[in-house]
Image: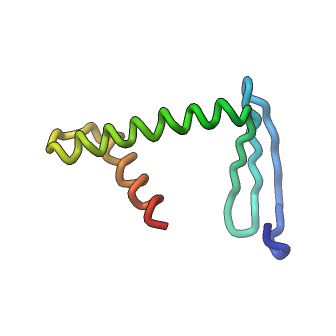
Amino acid sequence: MNDKERVLKQAKQPLGPVEVKVEGLEDGYRLTFRANPERIRTDRRVAGSFIAFLSQVDRAGIRLPFFFRWLLRFWKRYNQK
């Protein structure tokens, strides 16, 4: 964490098995999710499989609904960084 980073506001809220923490920084926001590490790994595998499936459907030329196209675009940009 950067020493110059200053948290202006902070809120924590448990949502079932997950704890969500929102921090208002000087130049933006930070979201932190805490949960059972094994469940997070499982959910990531499922999400990764779904993204791979959407990519294959997109490459096959089948038109995806807007939300799924947006999700793929976001994921491609996220992986480039």
- Return the residue found at the far bottom: 4
Res 48 → quadrant: top left
Q: On screen, 22 above or below 53?
A: below
Identify the residue shown where x is 71% and y is 42%.
33
Circle count: 0
Identify the residue shown where x is 82% and y is 55%.
9
Decide if residue 27 is on the left or right side of residue 69. right
Res 13 → quadrant: top right
Residue 56 spot, x, y in % from top left: 25, 42
Decide if residue 55 is on the left or right side of residue 29. left
Identify the residue shown where x is 83% and y is 61%.
8
- Quarter of the image that includes the N terminus: bottom right
- Return the residue found at the far left: 61
Residue 76 spot, x, y in % from top left: 39, 57
Q: Nearer the viewer, residue 35 or 12?
A: 35
Identify the residue shown where x is 31% and y is 40%.
54
Way the structure is coloured: rainbow
Residue 44 spot, x, y in % from top left: 54, 38
Res 12 → quadrant: top right
Residue 47 spot, x, y in % from top left: 47, 37
Q: On screen, 6 above or below 64?
A: below
